[in-house]
Image (cartoon, grey):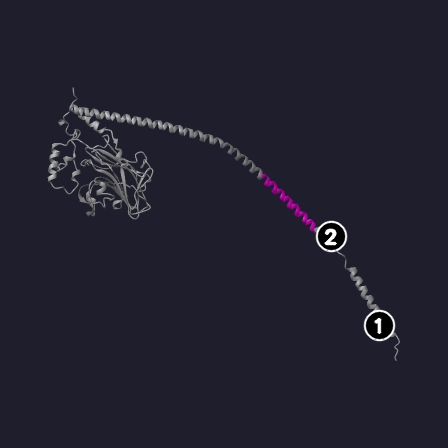
């Protein structure tokens, strides 16, 4: 007994929505926190370009443009193409620089990207085939994310203004955030979506990027540059590995492909628009849509042909989902063990810190002794000050008494001058009297004349 069409269709849709995502190693780098796992200055499965200098590889990030030198152009391109038609790509980047710094970061998914694009940006690239997402401060804004499509028929260098070529955009201030920003691109069977830091930037149900294109990231700066750093690029798909799709195309797709070879190529990016917009199918649209039983299941449940092979396919997908959940459980278990080990290490470190803190008790005792010694020194200083003041006062009083006694002693011990004056006067009087007596005798004596 087989299940009903409606229940199996719902199961198909649920399985498709809950399908596991597998990492594509050859299209990813930095997902383990290391840009160059071998520390050889190379990014596995990618090659670098740069003018005048090649990008600098650090332990956990790739510096496309340094902040110290302007007019830099750099690029990193994957060696292998993207062979899955449904995928999810995450790019973690950071832009920092001076207040008036500038530059642009370009994310490419293009055919012959390294040869057609190289180190170019959307402003300097010529003809290319694929998707371009540019992040810059276009129009003097704080930041903008814009998306372009080209089927190789448009030469971007001949377009002075690229506004009419944008199919999706949003504003985002990305400069000097101090943290990495994550831009996520998601290609599903019926939708193309771009998110920035977990918020929707834009989406379109009419875009389908063909398989076989290569991923690349380029950056360009002016004289006053910003520094663009890439922390990781992770590409995931709902299929294991990155093998080319081998699903047969419908007869309608084959016939349209033959008619497309005979017709002229359109002068826009119409080959990437896969959905019906009410005006009929454009030429060459169906040859890019795989014949998937999930395609259109929401609108055409009445025409689904349920078979045992389809049921087995759903069963295989569920089993794959179970294996993926088991892998996740093992990863979580491993992370839990690592967390326990880290917890034990932290507990040991805390124990060591506690032991060290106990040793600091001796420091507290020493501080107490120093405080006591300080008090004693202050008391000793006070005593010395008081004693010095008392000694000074005693010395001053003693010296004052000594001065007074010395004066009295000098006055009392000074010899009198009265006696000396009396003796001097008497001597003068005696001499004067003798002189007078002599003169009288000379005058009274007999003079003899010859």
Per the image, the residue denoted by label 1 is: 439
For the view shown, which residue lies furthest in the top direction? 1
Determine if the magenta segment contains residue 400: yes
Magenta residues, as a range?
Answer: 378-403
Q: Is residue 252 left or right of residue 359?
A: left
Q: Is residue 158 left or right of residue 99?
A: left
Residue 218 image-quadrant placement: top left
Magenta stretch, main secondary structure, is: helix
SS for tag 1?
A: helix
Q: Residue visible at 50% across and 32% down?
A: 361
Q: From the viewer's perspective, is residue 249 above or below residue 69?
A: above
Per the image, the residue denoted by label 2 is: 409
SS for tag 2?
A: helix
Q: Residue visible at 22% across and 42% down?
A: 115
Give the crowd class for mark 2: few <14, some 14-19, many >=20 residues within 10 Å.
few
Q: Residue 370, labelled with which disc? A: none
Q: Is residue 104 at least partly visible in the picture?
A: no
* Pick the front one: 139 or 275: 275
Q: From the viewer's perspective, is residue 443 above or below residue 165?
A: below
Label 2, label 1: how far apart the Cα atoms are: 50 Å
Question: How many numbered marks, from 0 up?
Answer: 2
* Pick the front one: 290 or 270: 290
Give the crowd class for mark 1: few <14, some 14-19, many >=20 residues within 10 Å.
few
* Pick the front one: 445 or 35: 35
- Image quadrant for the N terminus? top left
x%, y% of residue 242?
23, 32
x%, y% of residue 183?
27, 37
Residue 339 image-quadrant placement: top left
Q: Residue visible at 11% across and 37% down?
A: 258
Looking at marks 2 and 1 on the same chain, the residue that comes earlier in the sequence is marked by 2
Q: From the viewer's perspective, is residue 427 above or below residue 20?
A: below
């Amino acid at each position: 007994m087989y299940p009903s069409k409606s229940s199996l269709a719902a199961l198909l849709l649920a399985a498709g929505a809950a399908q596991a995502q597998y990492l594509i190693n050859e299209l990813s780098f930095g997902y383990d926190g290391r840009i160059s796992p071998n520390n050889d200055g190379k990014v596995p499965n990618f090659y670098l370009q740069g003018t005048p200098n090649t990008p600098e590889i650090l332990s956990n990030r790739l510096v496309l443009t340094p902040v110290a030198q302007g007019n830099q152009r750099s690029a990193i391109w994957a060696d292998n193409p993207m062979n899955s038609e449904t995928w999810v790509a995450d790019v973690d980047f950071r832009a920092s620089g001076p207040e008036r710094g500038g530059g642009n970061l370009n994310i490419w998914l293009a055919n012959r990207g390294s040869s057609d694009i190289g180190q170019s940006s959307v402003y300097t690239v010529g003809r290319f085939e694929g998707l371009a997402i540019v992040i810059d401060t276009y129009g003097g804004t704080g930041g903008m994310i814009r998306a372009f499509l080209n089927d190789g028929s448009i030469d971007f260098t001949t377009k002075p203004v690229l506004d009419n070529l944008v199919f999706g955009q949003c504003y985002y201030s990305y400069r000097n955030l101090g943290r990495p920003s994550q831009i996520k691109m998601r290609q599903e069977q019926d939708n193309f979506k771009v998110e920035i830091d977990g918020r929707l930037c834009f989406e379109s149900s009419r875009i389908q990027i063909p398989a076989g294109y290569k991923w690349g990231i380029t950056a360009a700066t002016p004289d006053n540059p910003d520094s663009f750093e890439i922390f990781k690029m992770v590409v995931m798909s709902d299929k294991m590995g990155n093998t080319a799709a081998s699903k047969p195309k419908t007869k309608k797709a084959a016939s349209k492909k033959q008619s497309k070879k005979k017709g002229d190529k359109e002068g826009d990016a119409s080959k990437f628009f896969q959905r019906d917009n009410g005006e009929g199918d454009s030429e060459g649209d169906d040859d890019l849509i795989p014949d998937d039983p999930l395609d259109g299941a929401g609108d055409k449940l009445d025409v689904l042909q349920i078979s045992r092979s389809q049921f087995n396919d759903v069963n295989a997908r569920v089993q794959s989902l179970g294996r993926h959940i088991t892998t996740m459980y093992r990863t979580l278990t491993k992370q839990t063990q690592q967390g326990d080990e880290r917890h034990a290490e932290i507990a040991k470190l805390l124990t060591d810190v506690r032991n060290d803190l106990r040793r600091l008790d001796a420091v507290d005792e020493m501080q107490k002794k120093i405080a006591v010694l300080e008090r004693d020194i202050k008391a000793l200083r006070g005593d010395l000050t008081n004693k010095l003041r008392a000694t000074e006062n005693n010395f001053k009083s003693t010296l004052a008494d000594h001065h007074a006694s010395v004066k009295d002693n000098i006055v009392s011990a000074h010899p009198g001058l009265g006696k000396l004056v009396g003796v001097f006067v008497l001597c003068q009087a005696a001499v004067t009297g003798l002189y007078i007596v002599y003169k009288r005798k000379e005058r009274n004596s007999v003079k003899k004349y010859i």
